[in-house]
Image (cartoon, rainbow, N blue to C red):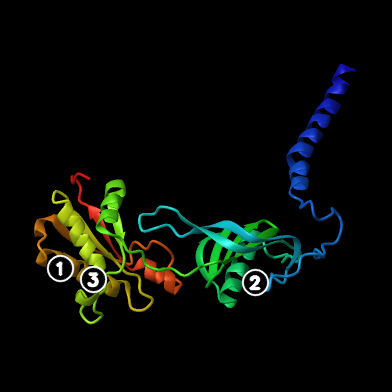
Amino acid sequence: MAVDRIPSTLDLGIALFCFVHFLAPCLAQVNPSIGIGEPNVEAADCPNLTIFPKLVTSTVVSCRSGDSVEVTMPLKPDAQGFAREKAVRGAYEYREYQITLHDQQQVDQQGRTFENLMQLLTMTGFIVKYSYSPITITARNGGVWILINVSEDFYNVSVVRAKEGPWAPPFKSAEEISREMGLERRAVIYGIEFFPSNQAINEKNCKALTEVLQYLRNNPDQAVTVESHKFSTRGSAEDDLEITRRRANAVVDWLVAHGITAGRLQAKPFGRAKPVTENDTPQEIQQNERIELALLPGTAR
């Protein structure tokens, strides 16, 4: 009799194992907003997004909105391979969708959904700023940012209409430059004007450069690198590198002509290699075009 009970005990254990490891996870993946066994229908209180249409194979199952919400958008890594991101705040809309029409020949449904969304973004005028297949997409069209996440039969879309106010390049006095150099070992300088023909210094408007000169006079033991940055919307990366080479040399030459020892200065062009922000709007282009001072290694603050 004991031998007869062993197979039934094993059968029960195997059945329990299968339920826990296979059936339970499948049930856990079902979206709670859709009833099991019920037909998929559009959420009645979730209108379609006007800025970005849904895939024809999907239905909206949930939504949210807000007047001022901040969303962190992942971006392409920088030139050194470090991850970047941008916090965007503004009017916010969120939609979650389920893929309801499947291609029976398609094995990788998530990958197919990702590819379709990438194509739809391009068709609707968005620029893809970052993508990690088949999971995440960040895209932008002017002041409108989109973050898309894809997971098996579902994907969600977060839309943020950024509130970007006017921006004026900050003017820094010699004292402010000195304070920044003491804290960060570098300072960003805006407002130095160059002639577009040869990138020489515009002497009629060089107040910002005059403050740099005064900072160097006040700190005679400090040596600095003069870094030049520019990310133009036209031309090539090589063109921007050449422009920044001329500008960095022009700043160094001007400072030497006004009494700063040449050995304290080192010109270094970066072109478009180190933008401080994206380069899609006039404001961002203006922010990326700058001169930076950086203390040379071994220089005391």
Is label 3 in a helix, a strand or a loop? Answer: loop
Asked if residue 135 can be seen in this view, the reply is no
- For badge 2, the amino acid type reads Phe
Is label 2 in a helix, a strand or a loop? Answer: loop
The tag earlier along the polypeptide, 3 or 1, is: 3
- Pointer 2 residue: 52
Front disc: 3 or 1: 3
Asked if residue 188 can be seen in this view, the reply is yes
Residue in front for this viewpoint, 173 or 33: 173
Residue 65 location, x and y as percent? Answer: 69, 61
- Pointer 1 residue: 254
Q: Residue at x 30, y 69 (%)?
A: 191
Quadrant that contains the C terminus: top left
Cα–Cα gap, marks 3 and 1 = 10 Å
- For badge 1, the amino acid type reads Trp
Please give the label number shown on residue 93.
Answer: none
Is 268 located above or below residue 281 in the figure? above
- Pointer 3 residue: 206
Cα–Cα gap, marks 1 and 2 = 51 Å
Is 194 located above or below residue 139 in the figure? below
Front disc: 1 or 2: 1
Q: Neighbour class for label 2 at 10 Å: few (<14), some, many (≥20)?
A: some
Is label 1 in a helix, a strand or a loop? Answer: helix
